[in-house]
């Protein structure tokens, strides 16, 4: 029997890692991720989780340790946020390029300067090209579910890529919510033991991480990209199996009241739930409006995304990051993804919710109203923003 | 060797599953100078063999130690370490 318990989202992640029976956890504490490694350290110390908990001196060391741990075939977990993710950046690429299925929670945090421990998506956007499978969570249940799923998908022999699970710092990571926890036997049925086919072993020496001179480097990158895109098949299969086992089904593009919607709002992460309230209110008043939330960020779900927005006239993209000199990174990717479509909605982008700035229902109302205005009359502003003085 | 491989031939993560295949890689073409052994001076002490960072110096059946030019990068450590002054470095262009 599953249990419905009140859990902080960070602790729900730790619970998923415990139930996944992770072998190695190497993490460096950083706000707002701290509660995850803290709880896991307790579990290991109390004997609730039989894992090596490796305290490291930096995030660079955390990811380096994880890389080595996965190389011997150990189920490996870490978590970080903001500046920590920036510090480990170099090794984030190495882990995916060497195809080690580490699972990492990122409690999304703004980037310095000025120093901010609060949430936005700048850290996530800075690692979008690193070759990790990346998903965004909306609530505590998803934080638990997607962490379990991340091990299942990343470790699949057809995938062997690391997986990043994004949780909005504070607005999700520190929120206590009802979370349904499955039985251990149910988890074990869904998540087989990690069988890494190239585990380092003194009895059968092999070379991991050989250098790639110009006569082979390009081929390695093409091979990586093809394998990464092909991982989508297992990503979808993983979600299907998760749903069949636990009753909750996930999709690359989550839809909310999109039927016959002329206008669509696009969000990522926890503010999706605030935006849902605004959509509800507008639907009640007869407005043909819906919401889509990008669950799968990488590999980008082109097919599902194009299908979802096909019938709409306007798509308003809400970004929680500025790509300096360009604008909203999600907006620019979305507009590019639709460029070749014969039938496509007009796409406008609005930026807000930076560095922990709250996004209220009123703010989302502004986003929608202003989005419609821009679609009709165009914009004479350098950057369209919400809630910024 | 690498020139013959396409992206489809690479192992997951570019892992090399055969041990010791570094010996296939020709490092001799990095060289700008090569060591020349004067057997009149050589005392067969094997210091060059010990110090060679690429294990490119090999003992011959006659007891002398000479560089395998397939691997020798021309670093000149052997010439520096030789107590008898039996090894001199010459430019690759010279005969």
Image (spheres, coloured by chain):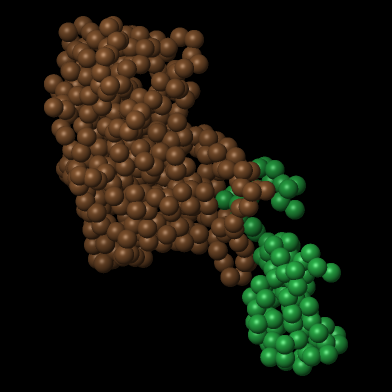
Chain colours: A brown, B green
Quarter of the image for the C terminus of chain A: give it.
top left
Residue drawn 45% across the image and 28% down it: A301
How many discs appear? 0
Where in the figure is residue A376, as x and y percent of width and height?
28, 6
Quarter of the image for the N terminus of chain A: give it.
top left
Is B73 above or below relative to A211? below
Where in the figure is residue A346, as x and y percent of width and height?
36, 12
Describe residue A172's horizontal placement relative to residue A185 as left or right.
Answer: left
Nearer to me, A151 or A71:
A71
Residue A25 in view, yes or no? no
The picture quadrant where one finds residue A40 is: bottom left
Residue drawn 67% across the image and 42% down it: B8
Where in the figure is residue A241, as x and y percent of width and height?
44, 37
Describe residue A209's horizontal placement relative to residue A153 as left or right.
Answer: right
Nearer to me, A378 or A342:
A378
Residue drawn 63% across the image and 43% down it: A219
Nearer to me, A348 or B83:
B83
Where in the figure is residue A224, as x and y percent of width and height?
56, 42
Is A386 above or below relative to A262? below
Residue A310 in view, yes or no? yes
Residue drawn 16% across the image and 26% down it: A387
The picture quadrant where one finds residue A107 is: top left
């Amino acid at each position: 029997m599953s249990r419905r318990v009140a859990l902080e989202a960070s602790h729900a992640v730790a619970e998923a890692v415990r139930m996944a029976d992770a072998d190695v956890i190497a993490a460096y504490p950083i706000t707002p991720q701290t509660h995850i490694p803290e709880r896991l350290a307790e579990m290991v110390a109390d004997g609730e989780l039989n894992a090596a908990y490796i305290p490291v001196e930096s995030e660079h060391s955390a990811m380096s340790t994880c890389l080595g741990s996965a190389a011997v075939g150990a189920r490996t977990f870490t978590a970080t946020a903001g500046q920590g993710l920036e510090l480990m950046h170099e090794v984030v690429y190495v882990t995916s390029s060497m195809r080690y299925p580490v699972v990492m929670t990122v409690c999304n945090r703004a980037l310095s300067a000025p120093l901010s421990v609060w949430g936005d998506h700048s850290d996530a956007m800075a690692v979008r090209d690193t070759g990790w499978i990346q998903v965004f969570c909306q609530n505590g249940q998803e934080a638990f579910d997607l962490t379990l799923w991340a091990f299942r998908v990343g470790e699949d022999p057809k995938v062997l890529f690391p997986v990043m699970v994004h949780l909005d710092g504070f607005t999700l990571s520190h929120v206590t919510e009802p979370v349904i926890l499955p039985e251990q036997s149910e988890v074990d049925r869904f998540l087989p033991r990690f069988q890494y086919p190239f585990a380092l072993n003194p009895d059968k020496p092999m070379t991991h991480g050989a250098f790639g001179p110009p006569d082979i480097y390009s081929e390695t990158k093409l091979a990586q990209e093809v394998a990464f895109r092909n991982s989508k098949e297992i990503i979808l299969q993983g979600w299907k199996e998760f749903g069949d086992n636990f009753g909750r089904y996930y999709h690359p593009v989550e839809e909310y009241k999109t039927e016959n919607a002329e206008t669509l709002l696009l969000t990522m992460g926890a503010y999706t739930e605030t935006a849902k309230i605004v959509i509800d209110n507008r639907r009640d008043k007869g407005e043909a409006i819906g919401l889509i939330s990008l669950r799968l960020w990488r590999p980008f779900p082109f097919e599902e995304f194009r299908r979802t927005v096909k019938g709409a006239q306007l798509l308003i993209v809400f970004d929680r990051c500025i790509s300096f000199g360009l604008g909203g990174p999600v907006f620019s990717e979305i507009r590019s993804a639709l460029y070749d479509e014969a039938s496509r909605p007009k796409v406008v982008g609005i930026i807000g919710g930076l560095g922990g700035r709250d996004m209220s229902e009123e703010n989302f109302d502004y986003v929608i109203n202003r989005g419609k205005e821009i679609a009709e009359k165009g914009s004479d502003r350098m950057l369209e923003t919400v809630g910024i003085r | 060797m690498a020139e013959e491989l396409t992206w489809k031939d690479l192992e997951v993560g570019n892992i090399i599953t055969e041990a010791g295949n570094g010996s296939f890689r020709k490092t001799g073409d990095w060289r700008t100078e090569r060591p020349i052994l004067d057997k009149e001076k050589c005392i067969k002490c094997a210091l060059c063999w010990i110090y060679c960072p690429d294990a490119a110096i090999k003992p011959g059946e006659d007891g002398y130690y000479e560089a395998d030019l397939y691997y020798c990068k021309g670093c000149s450590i052997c010439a520096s370490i030789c107590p008898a002054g039996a090894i001199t470095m010459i430019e690759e262009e010279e005969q």
